[in-house]
Amino acid sequence: MFRTVQTFAVLALLCASALFFAGCSKKADSDGGTNTNAAASGNVGSLEDFATAAVSFSALEKTGSLSLRYATQFSVDEYSVVSGGAGNSRGSDNARVSGTGPVYKLVRIASGSTFLLVPEGAPVPQNVPPDATVLQLPLKNVYLVATSAMDLINECGALDEIAFSGTKAKDWSVPEAAAAMNDGKITYAGKYSAPDYELLTAGGCDLAIESTMIFHKPEVKEKLEELGIPVLVEYSSYEPHPLGRLEWIKLYGVLFGKAAAEQYYESELARIEPIMQKKPVGKSIAFFYVNSNGAVNVRKPNDYVVKIIELAGGKYALSELLVEEENALSTMNMMMEDFYVSCVDADILIYNGTIDTAFSSIDDLFAKSELFRDFAAVKSGEVYFVSKDFYQQTTGIANFIEDLNKVLNGEYSNLIYLTKL
């Protein structure tokens, strides 16, 4: 009898111990113990969890998109693992935690390219879309070939992430870029058609930002990608609206984790929206230069410079120009006699110094053609020269709109890009 009671006591003690340890084990899991299927189950609370958890792209949900006002040539969508009731928290700009995991960003460029941005400390998802190129953040050794992107990257505070340039220091109109190259912080790695592959690979290049010129050298793009260097082709020149070009600063803010990009864009809009809302002044402007053959190079009516003139309150003198040859070029050549007929009565002449820089006085204009003496703008003293800096300084769109609005209203002080001849 005693032995039977003793046996039951031992069994009861063993059962109690088993229940106790099972409870401890379950508590360990709930308190953050190792869970190899955390991502799949949705029980992931931090980037540290994600660093060891497997996650499939198909398990991610779209949680938001980058707000764009004018840009149409790129988009950014956000994806993360979302579980009900989890509160949002924030890490760095590029590693924001939404719900229960880091935010992955899917960037699409109008050319058809797609990039998946993986936050620092997060794993590369499984089953990534086959057309997507993975970019592991942060980007630290970028090869920048697209000159129009440098000013935007500099303005949003990411110049330190540019390690290689496709433009030499002497050819930069962005002072900070030239200074960085002269100080040895950025190295010249060859132009778009002839990059120094050995230099780029030895320097750990993690992204090449190219202009659409790279499409003329597809073998170069293929070679870079073969070497493990992703290529993003900058498409801002295809934006139909000037403020769409400026809005590409938001893309660089996303790539480099710089919240200042959106802040800058909104501040520039606040400067020029009052001008855009004003009633047009009604004065006509001709924007041109004379090439070495004596032909006049002008902007087609659908060009972004024409749109800038209109946003500033002016009217393009060649707005009714019939364009017989449709191609990707935004400019065309006219015979001097034809330009004379179309623009002799224009209120304002602006000579494009971004191409023809050897121009300092009204006499230089007469040296191009004596016919300019008959132009109404010459007789009234309304002839201006736009500096070469305007081409590379993409963030100068707001300044240029302000310059144009001033001269349209007879104001000539504190002009930034225009010089009165």
Image (tube, rainbow, N blue to C red):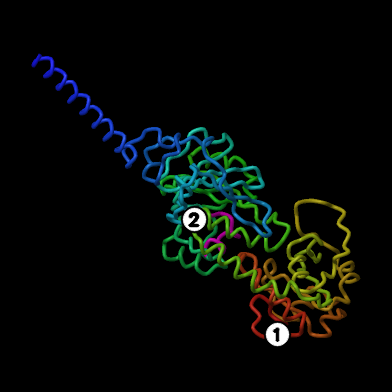
* Residue drawn at x 65%, y 71% as measured from the top left: 398
Q: Nearer the viewer, residue 207 or 55?
A: 55
The stretch drawn in magenta includes residue 148: yes
* Residue drawn at x 72%, y 70% as measured from the top left: 352
The stretch drawn in magenta includes residue 150: yes
Q: Relative to residue 266, is residue 366 depicted above or below?
A: below
Residue at the spot of label 2? 256
Q: Nearer the viewer, residue 162 or 29?
A: 29
Q: Nearer the viewer, residue 300 or 137?
A: 137
Q: Give the quarter of the image for residue 373.
A: bottom right
Q: Give the quarter of the image for residue 34.
A: top left
Residue type at numbered disc 2: Phe
Compared across the picture, whether 391 is left or right of 94 comes to: right
**Looking at this rendering, what residue extends furthest in the left direction?**
2
Query: How many numbered marks appear?
Result: 2
**Looking at this rendering, what residue extends furthest in the right direction?**
341
Residue at the spot of label 1? 412
Q: Relative to residue 90, is residue 390 depicted above or below?
A: below
Residue type at numbered disc 1: Tyr
**Of the image marks 2 and 1, the number of the one nearer the N terminus:** 2
Q: Residues within 10 Å of mark 1 (few under 14, many from 20)?
A: some
Q: CA distance from mark 2 to mark 1?
A: 39 Å
Compared across the picture, whether 320 is left or right of 367 comes to: right
Which residues fall within the magenta stretch?
144-154
* Residue drawn at x 61%, y 43% as measured from the top left: 113
Asked if marks 2 and 1 touch (Cβ < 8 Å), the reply is no
Q: Position of residue 248 (x, y in %)?
A: 61, 58
